[in-house]
Image (cartoon, rainbow, N blue to C red):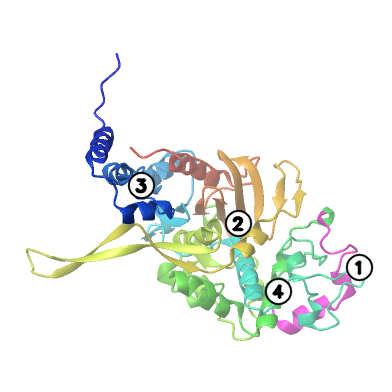
Amino acid sequence: MPRNLFRPGALFIALALLLTACAPAASPSESSAASSGMEPVDASEVVMRDAVPTILPEPEPEPQPVLTQADIDEALDTVMENYSAAGVTVATVELGQLSQAGAWGWAVKNEREMTPDTKIRIASISKVVIAMCAMAMAEDGLIDLDAPISDYWGKGAVNPYSKSQPTARTFMTHTSSIKNLDTTRGLSKLRGILQSKSSWRSMEPGNGGYWAYSNFGMCILGTTLELASDQLLDDYLQARLLEPIGARASFCGGRLAASEVATLYSGGSVSRSAAAHTGQSIPTQIGQTASYFPGGYTTSAVDMAKLVAVLANDGVYKEPVELYTLVENTETGEQLAVSESLPGKFKETRLLTEESVADMETPRFAVELADYAPFEQCLILRRQENVMGQDVLYYHTGSAYGVFSLMTYNPETKNGVVVITTGARRNMNERGMYALCYDIMEILYTKMEEQPV
């Protein structure tokens, strides 16, 4: 049954017409105005504009992180029912910002519990940090990633078997043509290796068909960055990337305190104590840090997740703006500052350009390994599709001294996860990722996509 609608506009139009009909005849001046083309404004139009307000649709609410501390704890407890380890630590990124973190087990068995802030030698994920430094140096005009490395090492540092020459970029795809020699350090020693014909493979640098994962290549890449910038890479890292985001980490274990670093376990035994790791000498000259570059970066899950957040958020680090309120303790009278995040308000710090991150994420070629799913090699980063319920993930693994670690992120959702374990068994799944880390991540990615109640 149709409803009778009251329309105020129609009533005003009728009144306007009635007033017009009863109005006296137009004066000569009014007639002159009409004849000159100046038409009087229709009163009904004015009334209609004032009487019918514009109704704007409600804006869509900004999406918010959904993970809770309980979600992290539950994921750890669930997965650790099926695995053994000395300690596990995890941190998550949601919508391009650090969200939650948790830990399980021991940093030092029976002495100190593992926490999300415990520093752990993260193994080959260190290579991702080197790549971020390389991109930042290129932005700062300190290095040309496509220049032959002989520009920085001297004319003798060449592959005598190839027409083209290795560049920093070819080292970042493991196609530099250098052999995977034992990791070493010392500028003169490294320069001698680069000048020896026996150090090189007979291939053209950049050829994905000759891909060979190279730890020694990272010794050369990191030292190339030092030569190009005329400073220790760790010093550059601290000032350019870590200090702006409040991260405490280093390629040099000696820069950290034993009380904040985890002891590493392998097969139930100590493989490297916290004291031994932090007792390392701190390099003072270019080339002395080289052997630390392939896997010596020591960080916490939280601080590594901060760098993952930068990549997931196209080069920008986001942190919520906090509102601080003074609250008085009724028992002691002491004034306490209580912080609360302001919804939708962020402090944003750009560390890399969007173009640099896109360059890091661009696939160069596919790598196929026996027993594992193929992946696309990017600049240090690896890429797989349809994994952990995600359309795409960028990632890197790490293993050494009983540490098994995994970092992943999805640039489309801007979500990511870092998991670091010590004392676990080496158990790699068909995706080429450590199963313990993978299983925790899969649970958390699913939780991130659930709608909040």
Marks 4 and 3, the one that precedes in the sequence: 3
Marks 3 and 1, the one that precedes in the sequence: 3
| Residue 362 visible in the displayed image | yes
Sort mark 1 into few (<14), some (14-19) or many (20+) by Cα contacts within 10 Å. Answer: some
Residue closest to the eye, 144 or 68: 144
- Seen at 62% across and 84% down, the residue is 231
Q: Which residue is mark 2?
A: 398
Which residue type carries mark 4? Answer: Thr
Marks 2 and 4, the one that precedes in the sequence: 4
Q: Position of residue 147 (x, y in %)?
A: 78, 74
- Asked if residue 187 is among those painted magenta in the image, a careful observer would answer yes
Which residue type carries mark 2? Answer: Gly
Which residue type carries mark 3? Answer: Thr
Q: Is residue 205 left or right of residue 407?
A: right
Q: Which residue is mark 1?
A: 162
Quadrant containing the C terminus in the rendered view: top left
Marks 4 and 3, how far apart in space? 44 Å
Q: Secondary structure at mark 4?
A: loop
Q: Secondary structure at mark 1?
A: loop
Give the label, 3 or 2, closer to the camera.
3
Determine which quarter of the picture holds residue 390.
top right
Q: Which residue is mark 3?
A: 68
Q: CB under 8 Å between callouts 4 and 3? A: no
Q: Position of residue 408 (x, y in %)?
A: 56, 51
Sort mark 3 into few (<14), some (14-19) or many (20+) by Cα contacts within 10 Å. Answer: some
Q: Which residue is mark 4?
A: 184
Q: Is residue 208 left or right of residue 381?
A: right
Q: Secondary structure at mark 2?
A: strand
- Asked if residue 217 is among those painted magenta in the image, a careful observer would answer no
Q: Secondary structure at mark 3?
A: loop
Q: Position of residue 277 (x, y in %)?
A: 52, 71
Residue bounds of the magenta highlight:
185-208
